[in-house]
Amino acid sequence: MSKLSLGKNRSLLYIFLIFGILYSCISFVNHYNFRTYGWDLGINNNAIFDYAHFRWNNCMIMQPSFTNVLSDHFSLYPILVSPFYWIFGTWTMLIFQILAILFGGLGIYKYVRRLTENETLSRIALLHFFTIWGVFSALSFDYHDNVVATMFAPWFLYYFEQQKWKWSLLFFALIVIAKENMALWAAFIGLGLVWKSAFEKNRKKLLMSFLFAFLAITYFILVIKVIIPSLATPGRDYLHNSFNSLGSNFGEVLLNIIKHPLKALELLFVNHSGDPGFDGIKAETYFAILLAGGLALFIAPEYLIMIIPIVAQKVFNDIPMRWGISAHYSIEFAPILVIALYTVIYKIKKWQIPIATISLAISLISCMSFLDHRTSEYYNRENSQFYKKSHWVRDFDVAEAHRILSKIPAEARVSAQSPLCPHLAFREKIYHYPFLGDANYIALIPAESNKYPLNNESYKKAIDDFLASGEWGIVDKNDAILILKKLN
């Protein structure tokens, strides 16, 4: 019996090991190959550098818009993780994110195992979670706090169901402190549990779910209305009130949803940007949700309640990129979809393994299809397609590019192009090119096709102007990298 148990544990460990390696092959390869960016890995790297030196982060990469990173998103994770900067360097936040996803997978496994008492179902659920499209999309684009926060949700639900309130509170707090919109999400997780607890007629759970929802919404309002404004640059509004189709702030948005429900319903589905080039993005998101098990949300509506703010902040947004399935904007669906699906499968009682296997196959095939092509805006295939050579190599010597970057002194004040920012962020002054500030070095990567926020013409002109001015000289260059130094 002990040998069988050991064998089962070993095979489970292999699942985590395989996906840990796979996720590393996406995230770490992107970072080494200059496919991570100033927004957001560079911002986070500069933040943990400052926190590790016991000072507030003045958000150099986001200047002049911000003078404190917490006035953009109020996230406490970088503060907690910052000591590891001394060990893992520029890889710190990426390692943290991958470990969090694996930890979230363990939470899924334990939740389904406790619910169903079926080892096979639990492992299928784990594979379903690890292969869902939202995880791969998030890993392909830098580090983001909401990815980590999402991974604590299954643990909160796991301990809530056991009425272990201290552990529930711990994981709930870890979700809430990730980012202000995560607090809003946490409130709806609480409301979903209110629904569930009411039908179960469990008074203790009902009371606690109300309490969790209240704590989360109170924290959300406190951060939005008090903390972030107190940290913000004078005259600077909260950056993420980007729902102008419904209102200029969260209060107006909520009021207009209540006053004009038909308009809000329409906005769930229509392209409200005015640009037909963005048609189909919202439909693709709903299609992806359904293929990953979304039908279960309507059979177990407590989980539908839990994703309301995630859907709303996506499809009501002014920025079409956020409507879709790319980047980190869909990660919160992953644990809720899987838990909802296996809750429904458990209730069916018959044909559980075949239904779970078919659901996994559909989700996996759809994920692979989305990796190859999607409607969503700004999809960079090379960042995601770990199974293709183009993900692993660049059309320039990457090792040589890193060698050239190493010539920039640690004390230098640098204005760096977006893909270079994460690698140069461990310094007191690092700006996102083309903002120069008081930089005495400029680090550019002309080999990068995306010259954001410039176009090719303005980018080349700026380089010509620097060299013609007599104020800047070349430190080193090759076909990929150009380092300039101020001469006086």
Image (cartoon, grey):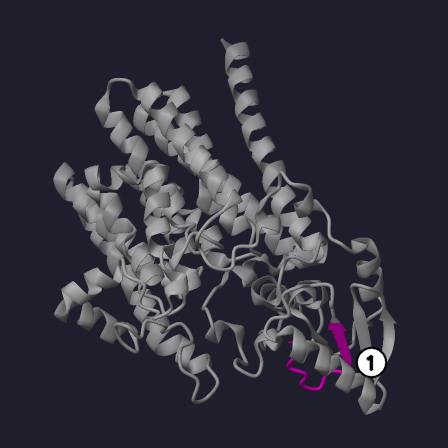
Instruction: Determine the residue positioned at 48% across, 85% down.
Output: 233
From the viewer's side, name the closer residue of 142 and 69. Answer: 142
Residue type at numbered disc 1: Lys
Instruction: Determine the residue positioned at 47% across, 53% down.
Output: 326
Q: Where does residue 464 sit, x and y in percent of width and height?
A: 77, 82
Please give left or right for residue 287 compared with residue 481 in the image. Answer: left
Q: Pointer 1: residues within 10 angstroms few (<14), some, or many (20+)?
A: many
- Look at the image and say whether residue 433 sits in the magenta stretch: yes
> From this viewpoint, which residue is outermost toward the top?
1
Q: How many marks?
A: 1
Please give left or right for residue 277 compared with residue 403 in the image. Answer: left
Which segment is the magenta one?
A: 430-443
Q: In the picture shown, does residue 194 fall above or below 17?
A: below
- Look at the image and say whether residue 124 sits in the magenta stretch: no
Q: Where does residue 429 sit, x and y in percent of width and height?
A: 69, 77
Q: Where does residue 244 sit, x and y in percent of width and height?
A: 31, 75
- Which corner quadrant of the image does residue 31 belong to? bottom right
Q: In the picture shown, does residue 407 fall above or below 138?
A: below
In the rendered image, which residue does mark 1 sit on? 485
- Which corner quadrant of the image does residue 395 belong to? bottom right
Element at label 1: strand
- Which corner quadrant of the image does residue 483 belong to? bottom right
Quadrant in the picture for the C terminus: bottom right
Instruction: Determine the residue positioned at 55% across, 16% down.
Output: 7
